[in-house]
Amino acid sequence: MIVAAECENNAGYFPDDLLGILEPASAIILDADPLNNVGFSRFLFKYHEESLHSYTTYCNTSNVKPYLHIRKDNNLEELYLACILPAVQELLQMEGLDLSGIDKVFPPQISSGFIVRLSDLLHLPPDMFIDAVGEGPDLFTSSLPYALDFAYKKELVKPGDTGLMITVGSGIQVGCAIYHF
């Protein structure tokens, strides 16, 4: 079971200094069926300590009110993209796949623009990418559950499909996985 929840910590006292995320809650239960080759096969996590300070948050107080200090590098999305490509390539090599073996990509749901840029970087058509964020704010740690729910509801995946799942986070950290539907 994967559970995530977000909130704009500064909304009550500092509404001009927000993360810019949707405030969702999500939970998803994933189950494998190895006899039918359904479920996750491989995971890969890569850490880029040289970019550790590209996205930081910490709590302090301002006039005795809790304040979440947020610092994002102006080029954060470019850093994410630069870190995603080698991680995806390594995962595919470990799995013995190339991008032609992928039916759908479940990218970080940062923005539709980010998803298009990632499709360009991977040289894949945008319709292979699940875009659950639309014009809304970043789905942050709920990206994967929302994208999976969106794909199932819109019937964008079917039994036998292979999905590439990609997540990014502060650090910079990249997580990738192969999922067999």
Image: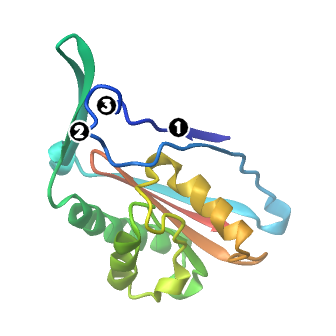
Q: Nearer the viewer, mark 1 or mark 3?
A: 3
Please provide percent x and percent y for residue 85. 33, 71
User: Looking at the image, is 171 positioned above or below residue 57?
Assistant: below
Residues at marks 2 and 3 touching, judged by CB atoms closer than 8 Å = yes
Q: Distance between the Cα atoms at labels 1 and 2?
A: 19 Å
Residues at marks 1 and 2 touching, judged by CB atoms closer than 8 Å = no
**Image quarter for residue 13?**
top left
Describe the element under mark 2 as helix, strand or loop: loop
**Considering depth in this image, is 99 or 108 the residue closer to the camera?**
108
Q: Which mark is residue 29?
A: none
Residue matched to label 2: 17
Q: Nearer the viewer, mark 1 or mark 2?
A: 2
Q: How many marks?
A: 3
Q: Give the residue displayed 68% in from the left and 77% down from the top.
A: 156
Residue located farthest toward the right when viewing the structure as drawn:
35
Q: Distance between the Cα atoms at labels 2 and 3?
A: 7 Å
Amino acid type, residue under disc 2 in the picture: Asp
Q: Give the residue displayed 58% in from the left and 84% down from the top.
A: 101
Left or right of 164? Residue 155 is: right
Give the color scheme: rainbow, by chain, secondary structure or one colour.
Answer: rainbow
**Image quarter for residue 26?**
top right
